[in-house]
Image (cartoon, rainbow, N blue to C red):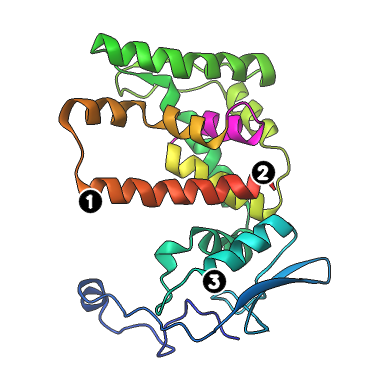
Amino acid sequence: MNGVFDDPAGEEPRDPMRSAAQPRPLPKRFYKTADYAAEGDGFVVRLDGKTVRTPAKLLLRVDREAVAAALAAEWAAQGTLIDPATMPLTRLVNSAIDGVARDPGPVRDEILRYAESDLLCYRAPGPARLVEQQDALWTPLVEWMHERFGARFLLAEGIVHVPQFPETIAAVDAALGDPDPLALAALSTVNTLTGSAILTLALLHGRLNAEEVWRAAHVDEDFELELWGDDKEAAARREARWQEMQAAALVLAA
């Protein structure tokens, strides 16, 4: 089975501006059942008994049964159309197989770059309530990084960049360990969603759960919401990001 996120016509549109203005239609659901099965040293997802492949035509196979079950559930939950936006775990696994497994170095390096300007190191000068909230949620994690991994982060007020010690970045690198491509892809997702290598490591090492990480990453945004309220589009975007966070957390927990 070809990668079902492929261009149905088999080629990219010639006019990228037109493509942006006119998103390609979602593919129709072509299967009745979705499940998973053991194969070799892992698990594969099946649609009507046929194995699924990634956009790069590689076998969509994982070594964690819980992830395989969740993947099959995503496929089973599709309606008359297949909407990749509602399949964060499938997108994550595709990325791990097609991209991260081939070249993990840049993905790891990106997490280390985030550590050089970590969200938790840049504190608001005010209002006082926001300062207190940041301190209550962020400072214990900064201290934990120092105590647990020897990573001493420098803090700043405002947005002016403050370089971190090379030893700090090296300690973050060591704390990442040696994750397999799927776990590294999940860590990258958490890192990008939160803007924080510290929060990423807190989830990896069980210091925080996904909900706690999410709350810590959105202190500023939640403070603004309390003041000015929310709108439907912003809420929908945030919910989509939360689904991506949950998919990544599932991979790391499995």
The N terminus lies in quadrant: bottom right
Q: Amino acid at mark 3?
A: Ala
Local packing at callout 3 (Cα closer than 10 Å; few below 14, some 14-19, many 20+) is some
Answer whether residue 94 is visible to the viewer in this image.
Answer: no
Give the residue at x 53% y 37%.
210
In the rendered structure, which disc, 1 or 3, sits on the residue that comes first in sequence?
3
Residue stretch in magenta: 195-208
75 to the left or right of 25: right
Q: Quadrant of residue 229?
A: top left
Which is closer to the viewer, label 1 or label 3?
3
Residue 186 position in % (x across, y down) = 58, 49
In the rendered structure, which disc, 2 or 1, sits on the residue that comes first in sequence?
1
Give the residue at x 55% y 83%.
32
Callout 1: SS? helix
Disc sitting over residue 76 in the figure: 3
- Give the residue pinned by disc 2: 253
| CA–CA distance in space, label 3 to label 2 | 22 Å
Residue 206 position in % (x across, y down) = 65, 30
Is 169 magenta? The answer is no
Give the residue at x 25% y 46%.
234
Local packing at callout 1 (Cα closer than 10 Å; few below 14, some 14-19, many 20+) is few
State if disc 2 and disc 3 touch (CB < 8 Å): no
State if disc 1 and disc 2 touch (CB < 8 Å): no
Which is closer to the viewer, label 3 or label 2?
3
Given residues 32 and 146, the one toward you in this image is 32
- Give the residue pinned by disc 1: 233
